[in-house]
């Protein structure tokens, strides 16, 4: 019997007590939803397999003492199939012990469901647009963006496991001043000049500049001979902005796609596949910025002041109004944000019911204006728009922070990290910590094959379970004759309880946008499994008495072998653990090796 089944049983008992007039002043409308009846694993196993505080939740509404109400629940629970005993403890806790067959039923549930065990559809019918990474196309993905890649893709997988339709989206900031600075940096590098004060540094700038020159030469364009003076026109005859030039425009139009390609390659190699690659520049070229402003103007949220156009965001909770068209006629950056949100909510294909933004630590001050804009469009902040702020990443080696990139100067890039410790360790280590907290990545630890290395510890549990399968096959042990009610030892019970908690954990990880909970669960399950492996046997142990021969040796083997029905049941338990670990690792985008 699973915690969810017990929760449902307790909910039904509450309604029965009300209908029979045994629950004092409690009425059906005062009974909370089933999900509110938490069933927990007691810290002290002497208190049973599971515990509930339902009586304490309802006692005040019932006008009864918690222990008296708990006794009524206990009487009903004792008569339920699969429950061995029920005790009332402390101020009104209900402690439940299952019979061995009921506790072990989770094994067959896992094996029958396979990789779908724990998955549910409670988020079905909703389209969640999850935008993450979205680094400027002015350089390689740095370690902060790498964290969002690991967390964002894992979150998408967890949300899909809860039935949601998830659109993974990358927003290319290919419009504005950062692109101008990128182009200026390339031009300077091409001429062997110092990097502009506000420019981008790193060996990758020299690489891209050289690639632009080579590509242009192949097209018959001598890019270095183009005018460097301000003004001029782009390839379509449109005048270039102040500070631009024909040469800079040529570098820009060729270099930005090169960076796009590099970013896309890095994401694919990191096992992150986006459904939509959205270009900021399209919001301007397609007129969506003007249309979004017009929509807000029609809603009464736009006004003119000091020659500029303002969004009256204070009407919707922001601390000050925001300029969206500056007095010089240029758009403020926030204008594109307004258009982009409107686009997500109203696009023809997969319009977002929920737009989730994953932003860096330096964007915390941006939340107020974004939520105000959401409300101005008639949506619900926190529901239709959700903003997640990630914290910083420190890469450590030998106890010291490292800056190991040769291409990007004094930062760590996604390729630097994966070259050092691999994709599995990179993804796991970045996803296992709550994105709200800073994280230290210890290169020495994550490249080691030790139990202190969390990804190795979990992967080794999976590989060990696969080795049990190979040994069982060699010994002729199969599922035939398995009696899961024989999974009655303390170690068996710990593993069974861990498996039973996976469905609730997976649902919680989705609702709380917390993929790190999957990693923590896997580490707990792996620890429980490793302990079980050390005390219980599926396959008879090898001889440890070197003097034993013939009949004596065979007698030792038989003495150390579990009976066939128990061995088969333990094989099934072993494989149930293997199934859940593989599923959990897949949700984190991490491989589940069968040998290590």
Image (cartoon, rainbow, N blue to C red):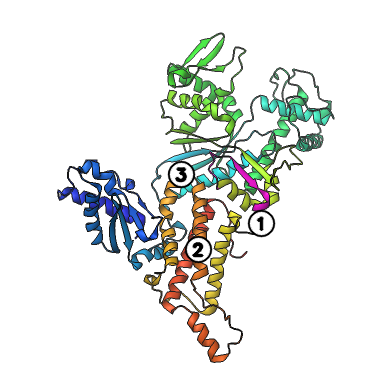
State the image coordinates of residue 91 (x, y, percent, origin top left): 29, 49
Residue that label 2 marks: 529
Tell whether 507 sits left or right of 274. Answer: left
Residue 166 visible here: yes
Residue that label 3 marks: 165
Quadrant of the image containing the N terminus: bottom left
State which tag comes first along the sequence, 2 or 3. 3
Q: Nearer the viewer, mark 1 or mark 3?
A: 1
State the image coordinates of residue 83 (x, y, percent, origin top left): 29, 63
| The magenta stretch spans residue 438 | yes
State the image coordinates of residue 352 (x, y, percent, origin top left): 46, 36
SS type, badge 3? strand
Quadrant of the image containing the C terminus: bottom right
Identify the residue shown where x is 69% and y is 37%: 259
Q: Which mark is residue 467?
A: none
Marks 1 and 3 sit apart, C-alpha to C-alpha, by 37 Å
Residue that label 1 marks: 448
Q: Is residue 270 above or below residue 170?
A: below
State which tag comes first along the sequence, 1 or 3. 3
User: Which of 230 and 51 lies nearest the eye of the viewer?
Assistant: 51
SS type, badge 1? loop
Identify the residue shown where x is 66% and y is 56%: 448
The span shown in magenta is: 432-447
SS type, badge 2? helix
Marks 2 and 3 sit apart, C-alpha to C-alpha, by 33 Å
Residue occupying the far top of the picture: 306
State which tag comes first along the sequence, 1 or 2. 1
| The magenta stretch spans residue 513 | no
Identify the residue shown where x is 51% and y is 76%: 539
Residue 592 visible here: no
The 10 Å Cα crowd at callout 3, few under 14, some 14 to 19, many 20 or more, is many
Tell whether 255 sits left or right of 390. Answer: right
């Amino acid at each position: 019997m699973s915690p969810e089944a017990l929760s449902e049983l307790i909910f039904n008992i509450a309604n029965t007590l009300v209908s029979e007039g045994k629950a004092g002043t409690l009425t059906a409308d005062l009974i909370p939803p089933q999900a509110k009846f938490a069933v927990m694993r007691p810290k002290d196993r002497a208190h049973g397999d599971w515990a509930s505080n339902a009586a304490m939740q309802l006692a005040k509404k019932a006008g009864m003492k918690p222990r008296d109400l708990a006794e009524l629940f206990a009487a009903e629970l004792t008569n339920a199939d699969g429950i061995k005993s029920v005790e009332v403890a402390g101020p009104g806790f209900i402690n439940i012990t299952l019979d061995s067959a009921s506790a072990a039923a989770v094994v067959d549930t896992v094996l029958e469901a396979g990789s779908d065990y724990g998955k549910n559809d409670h988020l079905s019918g909703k389209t969640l647009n999850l935008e993450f990474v979205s680094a400027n196309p002015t350089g390689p993905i740095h370690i902060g963006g790498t964290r969002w890649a690991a967390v964002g893709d894992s979150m998408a997988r967890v949300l899909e496991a809860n039935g949601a339709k998830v659109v993974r989206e990358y927003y290319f900031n290919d419009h504005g001043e950062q692109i101008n600075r990128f182009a200026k940096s390339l031009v300077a590098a091409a001429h062997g000049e110092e990097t502009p004060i506000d420019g981008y540094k790193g060996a990758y700038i020299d690489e891209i500049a050289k690639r632009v020159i080579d590509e242009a030469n192949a097209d018959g364009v001598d890019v270095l001979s183009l005018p460097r003076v301000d003004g001029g026109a782009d390839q379509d005859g449109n005048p270039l902005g102040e500070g631009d030039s024909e040469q800079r425009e040529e570098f820009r139009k060729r270099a930005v796609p090169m960076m796009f390609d590099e970013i896309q390659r890095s994401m694919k190699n990191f096992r992150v596949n986006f459904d939509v690659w959205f270009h900021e520049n399209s919001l301007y070229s397609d007129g969506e910025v003007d249309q979004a402003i017009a929509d807000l103007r029609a809603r009464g949220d736009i006004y003119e002041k000091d020659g500029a156009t303002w969004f009256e965001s204070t009407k919707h909770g922001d601390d000050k109004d925001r300029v969206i068209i500056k007095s010089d006629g240029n758009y403020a950056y926030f204008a594109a944000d307004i258009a982009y949100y409107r686009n997500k909510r109203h696009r023809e294909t997969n319009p977002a019911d929920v737009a989730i933004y994953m932003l860096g630590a330096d964007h915390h001050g941006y939340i107020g204006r974004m939520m105000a804009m959401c409300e101005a469009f008639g949506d619900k902040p926190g529901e239709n728009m959700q903003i997640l702020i990630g914290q910083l990443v420190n890469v450590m080696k030998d106890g010291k922070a490292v800056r190991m990139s040769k291409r990007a100067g004094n930062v760590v890039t996604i390729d630097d990290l994966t070259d050092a410790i691999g994709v599995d360790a990179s993804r796991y280590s970045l996803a296992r910590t709550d994105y709200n907290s800073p994280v230290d990545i210890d290169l020495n630890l994550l490249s080691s094959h030790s139990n202190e290395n969390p990804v190795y510890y979990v992967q080794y549990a999976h590989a060990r379970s696969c080795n049990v399968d190979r040994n069982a096959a060699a010994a002729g042990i199969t599922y035939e004759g398995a009696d899961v009610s024989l999974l009655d030892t303390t170690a068996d019970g710990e593993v069974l309880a861990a498996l039973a908690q996976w469905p609730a954990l997976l649902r919680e990880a989705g609702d709380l946008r917390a993929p790190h909970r999957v990693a923590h669960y896997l580490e707990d399950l792996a620890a429980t499994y490793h302990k079980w492996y050390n005390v219980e046997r599926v396959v008879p142990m090898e001889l440890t008495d070197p003097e034993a021969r013939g009949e004596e040796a065979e007698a030792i083997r038989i003495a150390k072998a579990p009976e066939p029905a128990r061995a088969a049941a333990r094989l099934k338990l072993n494989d149930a653990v293997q199934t859940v670990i593989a599923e959990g690792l897949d949700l984190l985008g991490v491989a589940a090796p069968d040998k290590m």
